[in-house]
Image (tube, helix red, strand yellow):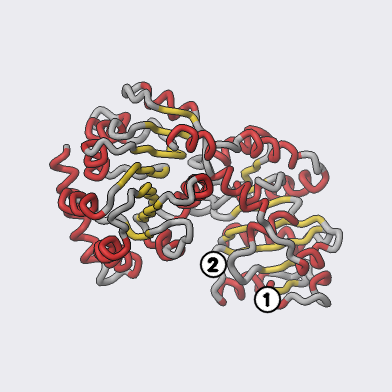
């Protein structure tokens, strides 16, 4: 299996090189995996040891971020190396100030791994959630470097738990300790004789809580609210908007803030074309016109997490496509949260439904009934607030164990 893994890694490298000629994301990944050597050779302090954090993309970065920042807060002299697999994470966070070095992860060949460790003196390594790279993990184990995975979650469908999964199980045994999100993950790992496991929870709760504490007042949104019930819909797609816009067109006693997942002009115009009520783009809001609008379309980035604080109800987009976006970003404010039908792979969504604070809608009828019931009953949000409160603290549990 080790031979097959290394063959697959080499094939992946070649395919990425070919794809880089036609695909922008592949081009960035391919270029980044080569530029990493120049970055490391020029930026690594040879006299220092580094705590290495590796994440796949932006979502995993947000899970690792609370640990990085608390670690830096407690030990400001700690050197942090942060690597990304995906361009969608690296391109946004390549200037992240809490890391001393940010770069792509080199392709996981034995040659690259040896070169990586010759350039960086790793004190400990922390992988986030799903990242398993056989050659890197083996080398960390061979060097007796403490290696951890945090906010991990396991399902019985994964290769670790299959008859053919011996190589993958060996990767798990390279970790000094695994910090998992739930009891089910711990139980699954025990079935394959992996016992160095702690149920620490999901660090994303700590991250969204920190974001909520830093949320800003938005005077124009306060003007827009004007004493009405407010629905804030985040990261929406067309299928979500078809339901939401019909509801707001038919219900004048409620106002809507909608933040589409993509904010290019054609998407904004698509939304405007379906609205029959008074609406404005966020960029058009003024002190004089904000209160008169029934719907605000967010046409910029960076303020959605603060806008959720003004919501009575939140709707999270993506549930009629590949899967829902960030539910916790809204839930942290103690408000009920709705989404579409594709949510089962998201643990927090299932748990919000179980506690009575989350709701899946399948069509306009269920959306309307759910919105109407929640507008009439303001007590549901307390269930959400309690759920978030019970799940805080993963960051401190992890740091206490590894620092």
Instruction: Please name the residue shown 46% across and 32% down the image.
Output: 401
Classify mark 2: helix, strand or loop: loop
Query: Which is more toward the observer, 129 or 372?
Result: 129
* Picture coordinates of residue 281, whole percent (x, y): 68, 73
Do callouts 1 and 2 mark residues in contact (Cβ within 8 Å)? no
Classify mark 1: helix, strand or loop: helix
Residue 378: quadrant of the picture: top right
Q: Eyeballing the image, is 121 above or below 21?
A: above
Q: Eyeballing the image, is 105 above or below 122?
A: below
Pick the quarter of the image with the C terminus: top left
> Relative to 10, is 285 on the left or the right?
right
Instruction: Please name the residue shown 16% across and 39% down the image.
Output: 2
Can you tell which of label 1 and label 2 is closer to the viewer?
1
Residue that lies at the very extreme toward the left in this rendered image: 3
Asked if residue 317 shows in the view, the reply is: yes
* Picture coordinates of residue 42, whole percent (x, y): 28, 65
Residue marked by disc 2: 262
Residue that lies at the very extreme toward the right in this rendered image: 227
> Relative to 15, is 328 on the left or the right?
right
Residue that lies at the very extreme toward the front in this rendered image: 47
Residue 135: quadrant of the picture: top left
Pick the quarter of the image with the N terminus: top left
Query: Which is more toward the observer, 372 or 306?
Result: 306
* Picture coordinates of residue 333, whole percent (x, y): 70, 48
Judge the density around disc 1: few (<14), some (14-19), many (≥20) Cα neighbours within 10 Å: few
Instruction: Please name the residue shown 69% across and 72% down the image.
Output: 282
Judge the density around disc 2: few (<14), some (14-19), many (≥20) Cα neighbours within 10 Å: some
> Relative to 302, is 400 on the left or the right?
left
| Mark sitting on residue 283 | 1
């Amino acid at each position: 299996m080790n031979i097959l893994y290394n063959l697959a890694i080499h094939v992946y490298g070649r395919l990425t090189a070919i794809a880089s000629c036609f695909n922008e994301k592949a081009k960035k990944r391919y270029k980044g995996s080569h530029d990493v050597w120049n970055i490391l050779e020029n930026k690594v302090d040879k006299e220092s040891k580094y705590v290495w954090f590796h994440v796949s993309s932006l979502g995993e970065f947000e899970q690792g971020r609370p640990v990085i920042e608390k670690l830096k807060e407690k030990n400001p002299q700690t050197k942090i190396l942060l690597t990304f697999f995906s361009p969608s994470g690296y391109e946004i966070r390549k200037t992240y100030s809490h890391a001393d070095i940010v770069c792509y992860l080199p392709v996981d060949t034995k040659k690259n791994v040896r070169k990586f460790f010759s350039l960086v003196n790793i004190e400990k390594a922390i992988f986030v959630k799903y990242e398993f790279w056989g050659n890197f993990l083996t080398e960390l184990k061979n060097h007796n470097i403490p290696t951890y995975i945090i906010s991990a979650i396991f399902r019985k469908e994964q290769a670790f738990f299959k008859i053919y999964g011996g190589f993958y199980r060996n990767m798990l045994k390279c970790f000094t300790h695994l910090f998992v999100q739930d009891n089910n993950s711990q139980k699954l790992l025990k079935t394959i004789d992996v016992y160095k496991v702690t149920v620490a929870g999901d660090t994303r709760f700590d991250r969204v809580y920190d974001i909520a504490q830093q949320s800003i007042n938005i005077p124009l949104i306060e003007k827009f609210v004007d004493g009405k019930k407010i629905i804030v819909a985040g990261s929406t797609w067309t299928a979500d908007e078809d339901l939401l816009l019909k509801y707001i067109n038919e219900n004048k006693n409620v106002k809507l803030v909608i933040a589409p997942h993509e904010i290019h002009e054609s998407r904004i115009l698509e939304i405007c074309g379906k609205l029959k009520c008074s609406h404005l783009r966020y960029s058009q809001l003024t002190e004089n016109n904000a209160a008169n609008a029934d719907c605000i379309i967010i046409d910029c980035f960076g303020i959605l997490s603060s806008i959720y604080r003004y919501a009575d109800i939140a709707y999270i987009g993506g549930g009629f496509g590949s899967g829902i976006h960030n539910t916790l970003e809204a839930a942290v404010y103690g408000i009920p949260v709705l989404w579409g039908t594709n949510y089962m792979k998201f643990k927090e969504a299932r748990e919000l439904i179980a506690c009575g604070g989350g709701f899946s809608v399948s069509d306009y009828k269920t959306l309307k009934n759910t919105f109407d019931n929640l507008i009439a009953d303001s007590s549901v949000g307390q269930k959400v607030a309690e759920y978030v409160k019970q799940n805080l603290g993963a960051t401190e549990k992890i740091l206490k164990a590894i620092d």
